Image (cartoon, grey):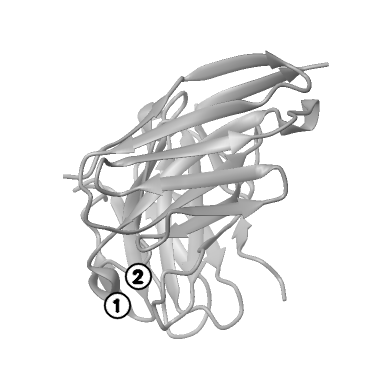
Amino acid sequence: KQEVTQIPAALSVPEGENLVLNCSFTDSAIYNLQWFRQDPGKGLTSLLLIQSSQREQTSGRLNASLDKSSGRSTLYIAASQPGDSATYLCAVVRGEGETSGSRLTFGEGTQLTVNP
Amino acid sequence: NAGVMQNPRHLVRRRGQEARLRCSPMKGHSHVYWYRQLPEEGLKFMVYLQKENIIDESGMPKERFSAEFPKEGPSILRIQQVVRGDSAAYFCASSPPNFSGNTIYFGEGSWLTVV
Protein backbone atom coordinates (compact mmCIF):
# COMPACT_ATOMS: atom_id res chain seq x y z
CA LYS A 1 0.00 0.00 0.00
CA GLN A 2 1.41 3.35 -1.07
CA GLU A 3 2.07 5.84 1.71
CA VAL A 4 3.14 9.43 1.13
CA THR A 5 4.79 11.47 3.87
CA GLN A 6 5.57 15.17 3.86
CA ILE A 7 8.07 16.92 6.08
CA PRO A 8 7.82 19.37 7.73
CA ALA A 9 4.13 19.56 8.60
CA ALA A 10 4.42 23.32 8.99
CA LEU A 11 7.03 25.88 8.07
CA SER A 12 7.29 29.60 8.77
CA VAL A 13 9.91 31.69 6.99
CA PRO A 14 10.65 35.38 6.43
CA GLU A 15 9.98 36.81 3.00
CA GLY A 16 12.79 36.32 0.50
CA GLU A 17 14.09 33.03 1.85
CA ASN A 18 14.64 30.00 -0.36
CA LEU A 19 13.01 26.89 1.05
CA VAL A 20 12.62 23.18 0.43
CA LEU A 21 9.60 20.99 1.08
CA ASN A 22 10.09 17.25 1.27
CA CYS A 23 7.95 14.35 0.14
CA SER A 24 8.65 10.63 0.43
CA PHE A 25 6.68 7.64 -0.86
CA THR A 26 6.98 3.98 0.03
CA ASP A 27 6.27 2.31 -3.35
CA SER A 28 8.60 3.42 -6.14
CA ALA A 29 6.31 1.99 -8.86
CA ILE A 30 4.73 5.33 -9.60
CA TYR A 31 3.46 6.76 -12.88
CA ASN A 32 3.99 10.37 -11.93
CA LEU A 33 4.22 12.73 -8.98
CA GLN A 34 2.49 16.06 -8.60
CA TRP A 35 2.80 19.01 -6.30
CA PHE A 36 -0.37 20.95 -5.54
CA ARG A 37 -1.15 24.13 -3.69
CA GLN A 38 -4.25 24.48 -1.54
CA ASP A 39 -5.43 27.79 -0.13
CA PRO A 40 -7.82 27.81 2.87
CA GLY A 41 -11.37 26.97 1.83
CA LYS A 42 -10.32 26.41 -1.76
CA GLY A 43 -9.64 23.56 -4.13
CA LEU A 44 -6.29 22.30 -5.35
CA THR A 45 -4.11 23.97 -7.94
CA SER A 46 -1.55 21.84 -9.73
CA LEU A 47 1.93 23.37 -9.57
CA LEU A 48 4.23 20.83 -11.15
CA LEU A 49 3.92 17.32 -12.54
CA ILE A 50 6.94 15.03 -12.90
CA GLN A 51 6.64 11.87 -14.97
CA SER A 52 8.36 8.80 -13.54
CA SER A 53 11.04 9.01 -16.25
CA GLN A 54 11.90 12.61 -15.41
CA ARG A 55 14.22 13.97 -12.73
CA GLU A 56 12.87 17.50 -12.32
CA GLN A 57 10.44 20.14 -13.50
CA THR A 58 10.62 23.91 -13.21
CA SER A 59 8.01 26.62 -13.31
CA GLY A 60 9.00 30.15 -12.42
CA ARG A 61 10.34 30.21 -8.88
CA LEU A 62 9.39 26.57 -8.31
CA ASN A 63 11.54 23.54 -8.97
CA ALA A 64 10.50 19.99 -8.20
CA SER A 65 12.86 17.02 -8.24
CA LEU A 66 12.14 13.32 -8.26
CA ASP A 67 14.35 10.43 -7.18
CA LYS A 68 12.12 7.45 -7.83
CA SER A 69 14.58 4.83 -6.64
CA SER A 70 14.84 6.38 -3.19
CA GLY A 71 11.17 7.36 -3.07
CA ARG A 72 11.76 11.07 -2.62
CA SER A 73 10.73 14.36 -4.12
CA THR A 74 11.50 17.92 -3.14
CA LEU A 75 9.79 21.19 -3.97
CA TYR A 76 12.16 24.14 -3.99
CA ILE A 77 10.69 27.63 -3.74
CA ALA A 78 13.06 30.48 -4.49
CA ALA A 79 12.74 33.99 -3.08
CA SER A 80 9.57 33.22 -1.15
CA GLN A 81 6.75 35.79 -1.00
CA PRO A 82 3.81 36.24 1.38
CA GLY A 83 1.54 35.16 -1.48
CA ASP A 84 3.20 31.75 -1.38
CA SER A 85 1.55 31.09 1.99
CA ALA A 86 -0.63 28.01 1.53
CA THR A 87 -0.64 24.27 2.10
CA TYR A 88 1.50 22.33 -0.35
CA LEU A 89 0.49 18.79 -1.15
CA CYS A 90 2.50 16.05 -2.77
CA ALA A 91 0.65 13.22 -4.55
CA VAL A 92 1.62 10.17 -6.58
CA VAL A 93 -0.17 8.19 -9.27
CA ARG A 94 0.27 4.42 -9.23
CA GLY A 95 2.25 2.74 -11.96
CA GLU A 96 -0.59 0.73 -13.46
CA GLY A 97 -1.75 3.72 -15.41
CA GLU A 98 -4.86 2.66 -17.24
CA THR A 99 -6.26 0.46 -14.50
CA SER A 100 -5.94 3.11 -11.82
CA GLY A 101 -6.50 6.12 -14.02
CA SER A 102 -5.15 9.24 -12.40
CA ARG A 103 -5.98 8.08 -8.90
CA LEU A 104 -3.78 10.06 -6.49
CA THR A 105 -2.34 9.16 -3.11
CA PHE A 106 -1.72 12.34 -1.16
CA GLY A 107 0.61 13.31 1.63
CA GLU A 108 -0.71 15.24 4.60
CA GLY A 109 0.73 18.48 3.31
CA THR A 110 3.12 21.17 4.49
CA GLN A 111 1.51 24.37 5.73
CA LEU A 112 3.77 27.23 4.64
CA THR A 113 3.65 30.74 6.07
CA VAL A 114 5.83 33.42 4.55
CA ASN A 115 6.06 36.46 6.80
CA PRO A 116 6.47 39.94 5.31
CA ASN B 1 -13.55 25.98 -21.05
CA ALA B 2 -15.09 25.90 -17.62
CA GLY B 3 -13.22 23.99 -14.95
CA VAL B 4 -14.55 21.23 -12.75
CA MET B 5 -17.78 22.50 -11.24
CA GLN B 6 -19.01 21.33 -7.87
CA ASN B 7 -22.21 22.22 -6.11
CA PRO B 8 -23.28 23.05 -3.60
CA ARG B 9 -20.15 24.70 -2.28
CA HIS B 10 -21.46 24.54 1.27
CA LEU B 11 -24.12 22.23 2.63
CA VAL B 12 -25.51 21.88 6.13
CA ARG B 13 -27.44 18.77 7.06
CA ARG B 14 -28.91 17.47 10.29
CA ARG B 15 -27.92 14.03 11.48
CA GLY B 16 -29.93 11.38 9.65
CA GLN B 17 -30.58 13.46 6.52
CA GLU B 18 -29.20 12.79 3.07
CA ALA B 19 -26.50 14.79 1.34
CA ARG B 20 -26.09 14.93 -2.43
CA LEU B 21 -22.97 16.46 -3.91
CA ARG B 22 -22.70 17.13 -7.62
CA CYS B 23 -19.70 17.34 -9.91
CA SER B 24 -19.58 18.37 -13.55
CA PRO B 25 -16.20 17.43 -15.06
CA MET B 26 -14.28 19.59 -17.46
CA LYS B 27 -15.49 19.48 -21.04
CA GLY B 28 -14.11 16.44 -22.78
CA HIS B 29 -13.23 14.64 -19.52
CA SER B 30 -14.93 11.32 -18.93
CA HIS B 31 -13.07 10.22 -15.79
CA VAL B 32 -14.21 11.51 -12.41
CA TYR B 33 -12.65 11.03 -8.98
CA TRP B 34 -14.00 11.88 -5.55
CA TYR B 35 -11.76 12.66 -2.58
CA ARG B 36 -12.58 13.49 1.01
CA GLN B 37 -10.63 15.81 3.27
CA LEU B 38 -11.49 15.47 6.94
CA PRO B 39 -10.62 18.36 9.27
CA GLU B 40 -6.87 18.57 9.86
CA GLU B 41 -6.24 15.58 7.57
CA GLY B 42 -5.02 15.01 4.04
CA LEU B 43 -7.11 14.12 1.01
CA LYS B 44 -8.19 10.51 0.80
CA PHE B 45 -9.35 8.80 -2.38
CA MET B 46 -12.94 7.60 -2.34
CA VAL B 47 -14.06 6.49 -5.79
CA TYR B 48 -13.08 6.57 -9.48
CA LEU B 49 -15.80 6.54 -12.11
CA GLN B 50 -16.11 6.62 -15.86
CA LYS B 51 -19.39 7.25 -17.65
CA GLU B 52 -21.92 4.74 -16.29
CA ASN B 53 -19.19 2.67 -14.61
CA ILE B 54 -17.58 2.53 -11.20
CA ILE B 55 -13.94 1.61 -11.83
CA ASP B 56 -12.53 1.70 -8.30
CA GLU B 57 -14.53 2.28 -5.13
CA SER B 58 -11.95 0.94 -2.71
CA GLY B 59 -11.93 4.19 -0.73
CA MET B 60 -15.68 4.40 -0.21
CA PRO B 61 -17.10 3.62 3.23
CA LYS B 62 -19.02 0.35 3.02
CA GLU B 63 -22.33 1.82 4.14
CA ARG B 64 -24.33 4.97 3.46
CA PHE B 65 -22.06 6.23 0.66
CA SER B 66 -22.69 5.77 -3.05
CA ALA B 67 -21.55 7.42 -6.26
CA GLU B 68 -22.71 7.50 -9.82
CA PHE B 69 -21.71 9.08 -13.11
CA PRO B 70 -24.63 8.72 -15.51
CA LYS B 71 -24.45 8.94 -19.27
CA GLU B 72 -26.00 12.39 -19.07
CA GLY B 73 -25.53 14.87 -16.26
CA PRO B 74 -23.11 15.34 -13.42
CA SER B 75 -21.49 12.79 -11.16
CA ILE B 76 -23.24 12.53 -7.82
CA LEU B 77 -21.85 11.52 -4.45
CA ARG B 78 -24.67 10.54 -2.15
CA ILE B 79 -24.40 10.18 1.61
CA GLN B 80 -27.42 8.70 3.36
CA GLN B 81 -28.25 9.17 7.04
CA VAL B 82 -25.36 11.55 7.63
CA VAL B 83 -23.47 11.56 10.91
CA ARG B 84 -21.20 14.21 12.44
CA GLY B 85 -18.13 12.31 11.28
CA ASP B 86 -19.16 12.90 7.65
CA SER B 87 -18.42 16.61 8.07
CA ALA B 88 -15.60 17.24 5.63
CA ALA B 89 -14.64 18.83 2.34
CA TYR B 90 -15.46 16.64 -0.64
CA PHE B 91 -13.41 17.28 -3.75
CA CYS B 92 -14.12 16.12 -7.26
CA ALA B 93 -11.48 15.86 -9.96
CA SER B 94 -11.62 14.95 -13.63
CA SER B 95 -9.21 13.74 -16.30
CA PRO B 96 -9.35 13.07 -20.04
CA PRO B 97 -10.46 9.71 -21.46
CA ASN B 98 -7.04 8.70 -22.79
CA PHE B 99 -4.86 8.20 -19.78
CA SER B 100 -1.51 9.83 -20.38
CA GLY B 101 -0.57 10.82 -16.88
CA ASN B 102 -1.58 14.40 -17.45
CA THR B 103 -2.52 16.67 -14.64
CA ILE B 104 -5.98 16.12 -13.32
CA TYR B 105 -8.15 19.08 -12.46
CA PHE B 106 -9.88 19.63 -9.15
CA GLY B 107 -13.06 21.45 -8.34
CA GLU B 108 -13.35 23.98 -5.55
CA GLY B 109 -14.88 21.41 -3.23
CA SER B 110 -18.14 20.95 -1.37
CA TRP B 111 -18.01 21.59 2.36
CA LEU B 112 -20.48 19.40 4.26
CA THR B 113 -21.34 20.26 7.84
CA VAL B 114 -23.50 17.86 9.82
CA VAL B 115 -25.19 19.38 12.85
The local crowd at label 2, few if under 14, some if 14 to 19, many if 20 or more residues have their Cα within 10 Å, is many
User: Which residue, as the protein is rendered here, is positioned at the far front?
Assistant: A55
Left/right of residue B73 with respect to residue B51 in the rendered view: right
Quadrant containing the C terminus of chain A in the rendered view: top right
Q: Secondary structure at mark 1?
A: strand
Give the quarter of the image for residue B43.
top left
Disc number for residue B49: 2
Quadrant containing the N terminus of chain A in the rendered view: top left
Residue sitting at 22 percent across and 67 percent down? A96
Left/right of residue A106 with respect to residue A25 in the rendered view: right
Q: Chain of mark 1?
A: B
Q: Is B66 situated above or below A61? A: below
Residue A30 appearing in the image: yes
User: Which residue, as the protein is rendered here, is positioned at the far right?
Assistant: A116
Give the quarter of the image for residue B97.
bottom left
Amino acid type at image mark 2: Leu
Q: Is B27 situated above or below B78? A: below
Amino acid type at image mark 1: Asn
